[in-house]
Amino acid sequence: MLPGLDANPTPADYVRSILSFTKDNRGRDLFHWWRQARKGTKAPLFGSADIINACNLKCVHCYWWTNREATTGELTPEQWRIVIQNSFKKLKIANVSVVGGEPMLRKDVVQVFSEEMRNRMSVVTNGMFPLIAINGLYFVSIDGTEETHNRIRGPKTYGRIKENVKNLVDAGGRVNINLTLNTLNYMTATDVIREWDDIAGRISIQFHTPFVDDDPLWLPFGEERNKLIDSILEYASKENEYFVVNPKEQLELLRGNWGYKCPGWMILPLDYRGNIKMPCCMGSANEDALQPKCDKCGNAPYSGLLATIFPGEKAMAM
């Protein structure tokens, strides 16, 4: 699917998307990366940046709080500009996810990314603050239908988020939804998809990734998880094939353990001080921090890369 398409795209939308993709040398840079990959060179194609070490919410499932340390050395907007120029731009990164904490607490830094990574950036936000115009795309986190979401993220958060999303969409902005499935909300998945179908551009689905073996929020591999994935695939095939971002190959991968084949090298993740996080964007620059359980990973970006760009590894991971 081409980047920047709206729901139910028209021929004009496809033309617009192709023209947009050719701007800022994105097509050329992607071809350069592909040629290097064919030669066996492992270079990152995407990036992520935790631009702030603070958040206005404390969601019960959030991995970020697991490894949070006291804030030291948070970068200024101009320091982030230098980091962008010396890392993401130098490496010809195709898209950077601006995250946190809550990135909209640092709108000044979001603006720097919008300027430096024009048409190559997205902001992953809880949606509690008004969404400003950017040269990119928003991913707003929704964790179930209203009652379930509010139980996970806090009272009255759902209505406020929906209002902020609608306001930006009405103003011509681009907003997708992130849905992370866990044992608290998985039964609401198809209801969430249907509710947001007419509001947001698309929805990206992933599964909660545990940091400890006995995490009660992790939805185990097996019958319930498979039924859930089947229902998402059925929605995509019978109701709206475009709205769910995840391709069938990726959802099939998420039925079991694919983590041992994770293409972690494809995403360059930086923390709020500009240090590289390990082993992935869910990890930490602190080598003593807790690490995500890769054998139970439900992360959408990495599983999506494995399922769509590396079909050989995908088959082995199954």
Image (cartoon, rainbow, N blue to C red):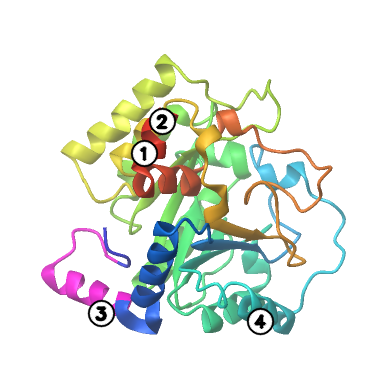
Which callout, 3 or 2, points to the residue nearer the camera?
2
Single out the residue that lies furthest toward the front.
39
Query: Looking at the image, is mark 3 or mark 4 earlier in the sequence?
Result: 3
Tag 1 secondary structure: helix
Q: Distance between the residues labelled 4 and 1?
A: 38 Å
At a point 47% along the width and 80% down the height, the residue shown is: 118
Residue 312 % position (x, y):
36, 39
Residue 78 % position (x, y):
71, 84
Q: How far apart are marks 1 and 3 (CA)?
A: 31 Å
Residue position for label 3: 19
User: Is 270 displayed left or right of 174 in the figure?
Assistant: right
**Label 3 Cα crowd, 10 Å radius (few <14 / some 14-19 / many 20+):** few
Residue position for label 4: 81
Prevailing secondary structure of the magenta residues: helix
The answer to the question of whether label 1 and label 2 lie on touching residues, with beta carbons closer than 8 A, is yes
At a point 51% along the width and 37% down the height, the residue shown is: 261
Query: Looking at the image, is mark 2 or mark 4 earlier in the sequence?
Result: 4
Residue position for label 1: 312
Quadrant occupied by the C terminus: top left
**Residue 56, located in which quarter of the rendered image?**
bottom right
Q: Distance between the residues labelled 1 and 2?
A: 7 Å
Three-letter amino acid code at disc 4? Arg
Does 136 appear in magenta?
A: no
Please indicate, yes or no, whether residue 88 appears anywhere in the rendered image. Answer: yes
User: Range of the magenta residues?
Assistant: 5-21
Please indicate, yes or no, whether residue 298 appears anywhere in the rendered image. Answer: no
Residue position for label 2: 316
Query: Looking at the image, is mark 1 or mark 3 earlier in the sequence?
Result: 3
Query: Looking at the image, is mark 3 or mark 2 earlier in the sequence?
Result: 3
